[in-house]
Image: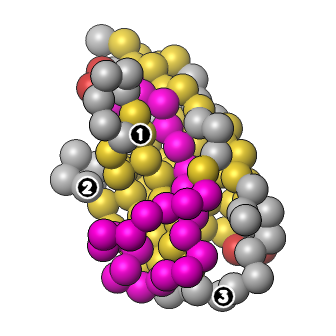
Amino acid sequence: QVQLMESGGASVQAGGSLRLSCVSSKVPYRHYCMGWFREVPGKARERVAVISVGSGNTNYEDFALGRFTVAQDSAKNTLYLQMNNLKPEDTAMYYCAANTRFSGSWCWGDIAYNNWGQGTQVTVSS
């Protein structure tokens, strides 16, 4: 079981930037999946960006392409999500997640992320 804790959420104006962080407990594998997801009340949780830890390969949802960047610092056991040019529709609770049973392209395939943080709120005003 991987423990995850997000931080960095805030209220910002449209066009602004935020960097979310997710500190994890130490994972005893070199290759595994981590990602950022978001959820708005009344809607299904959606994937934002995922990374295959070890290779560093990433995958983004269309709405995140060109605006968001996911990165992982293994030395600090920390996953980041840099979000630029934020829009009101980016308002959501953002969650960090991990799946230590898969890596590579499986990370953005049809797998279940079974370790979750408590979330951090991002609010973007127009």
Label 2 vs 1, first from the N-terminus = 1
The quarter of the image holding the N terminus is bottom right
In the displayed structure, does residue 73 sit left or right of residue 86?
right
| Alpha-carbon span between mark 2 and mark 1 | 11 Å
Label 1 vs 3, first from the N-terminus = 3
The quarter of the image holding the C terminus is top left
Secondary element at image label 3: loop
Q: Position of residue 100 (x, y in %)?
A: 60, 76
| Residue 124 appears in the figure | yes
Tell me the residue that label 3 is attached to. 30
Q: Nearer the viewer, mark 2 or mark 1?
A: 1
Q: Position of residue 15 (x, y in %)?
A: 34, 27
Q: Is residue 93 magenta?
A: yes
Which amino acid type is marked by label 2? Glu
Tell me the residue that label 1 is attached to. 38
Query: What residue span does the magenta drawing correspond to?
Result: 90-115
Q: Residue at coordinates 71% horizontally, 46% vertically from top-left? A: 5
**Image quadrant of residue 104?**
bottom left
